[in-house]
Image: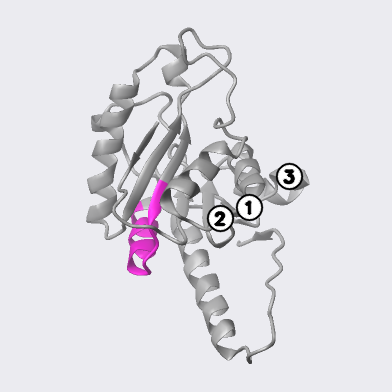
């Protein structure tokens, strides 16, 4: 399922997980009246918007396959989130949701390549948006988010309850960075991009620079 604004291409995007990253994690919720931004999320979205970063949501929504809600109900939630994000000053790039689960109870009970930790949904989103995954970021709160982001070629940031555990995770699940919340992630993205842009301007013609990332836990 996708909900996007196709009016322009974006060469770089911040992809966000929905539950536990952008929103408080209320299991299987598609009721807009129960939606609450996670701590630091409003401020993080506003900061990203100030610096010109489009935002796209990339989320597993197995409640569809479980029969808890429909694609139409999920689309209504996306329609609710878009103006909320735009009111904070950020560009809405799209809402990408995987509705599948092999153990589900309906036609969505299938194996797929879009359910995180597989990278398919990120690859699809980047293709439709014209985004360079190597220049984009994926921010999420679970190892599945980090594994999907790494497999897709994004730079990754872990937020939420497990952020202090990031350094102990296996290589294919370990994020590039870990911070408490989306505001911390936005500050990190803005700061790192400013340094990269500054280095690029200072690099003489004919020389190349390379930024090597390791997992960094910001305390």
Q: Which one is earlier in the sequence, the residue at label 1 or at label 2?
A: 2
Which of the 4 quarters of the picture holds residue 91? bottom left
Q: Label 3's element?
A: helix
Asked if the residue at tag 3 contacts the one at tag 2, i.e. Cβ–Cβ closer than 8 Å, the answer is: no
| Residue 149 visible in rendering | yes
Say which residue label 2 marks.
Answer: 133
Question: Marks 2/3: CA distance?
Answer: 17 Å
Which of the 4 quarters of the picture holds residue 115? top right
Q: Which one is earlier in the sequence, the residue at label 2 or at label 3?
A: 2
Q: Quadrant of the N terminus?
A: top left
Say which residue label 3 marks.
Answer: 172
Question: Marks 1/2: CA distance?
Answer: 6 Å
18 is higher (above) or lower (below) than 200 = above
Q: Label 2's element?
A: helix
Residue at coordinates 50% horizontally, 77% vertically from top-left?
194
Q: Which residues are magenta?
A: 42-56
Question: Nearest the camera: 61 or 35?
Answer: 61
Q: Is residue 43 magenta?
A: yes
Say which residue label 1 marks.
Answer: 153
Q: Which one is earlier in the sequence, the residue at label 3 or at label 1?
A: 1
Residue at coordinates 63% horizontally, 52% vertically from top-left?
153
């Amino acid at each position: 399922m996708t909900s996007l604004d196709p009016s322009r291409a974006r060469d770089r995007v911040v992809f966000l997980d929905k539950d536990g990253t952008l929103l408080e994690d209320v299991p299987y919720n598609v009721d807009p009246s129960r939606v609450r931004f996670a701590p630091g999320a409003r401020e993080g979205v506003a900061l990203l918007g100030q610096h010109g970063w489009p935002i796209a949501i990339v989320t597993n929504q197995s409640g569809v396959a479980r029969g808890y809600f429909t694609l139409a109900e999920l689309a209504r939630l996306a329609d609710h989130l878009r103006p909320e994000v735009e009111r904070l000053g950020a560009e809405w790039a799209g809402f990408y949701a995987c509705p599948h689960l092999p153990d589900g109870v309906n036609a969505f009970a299938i194996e797929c390549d879009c359910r995180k930790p597989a990278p398919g949904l990120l690859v699809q989103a980047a293709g439709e948006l014209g985004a360079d995954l190597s220049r984009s970021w994926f921010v999420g709160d679970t190892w599945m988010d980090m594994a999907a982001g790494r497999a897709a070629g994004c730079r990754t940031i872990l937020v939420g309850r497990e952020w202090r555990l990031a350094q102990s995770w296996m290589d294919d699940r370990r994020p590039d960075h870990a911070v408490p919340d989306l505001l911390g992630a936005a500050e990190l993205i803005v700061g790192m991009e400013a340094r990269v842009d500054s280095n690029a301007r200072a690099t003489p013609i004919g020389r190349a620079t390379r930024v090597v990332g390791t997992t960094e836990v910001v305390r």
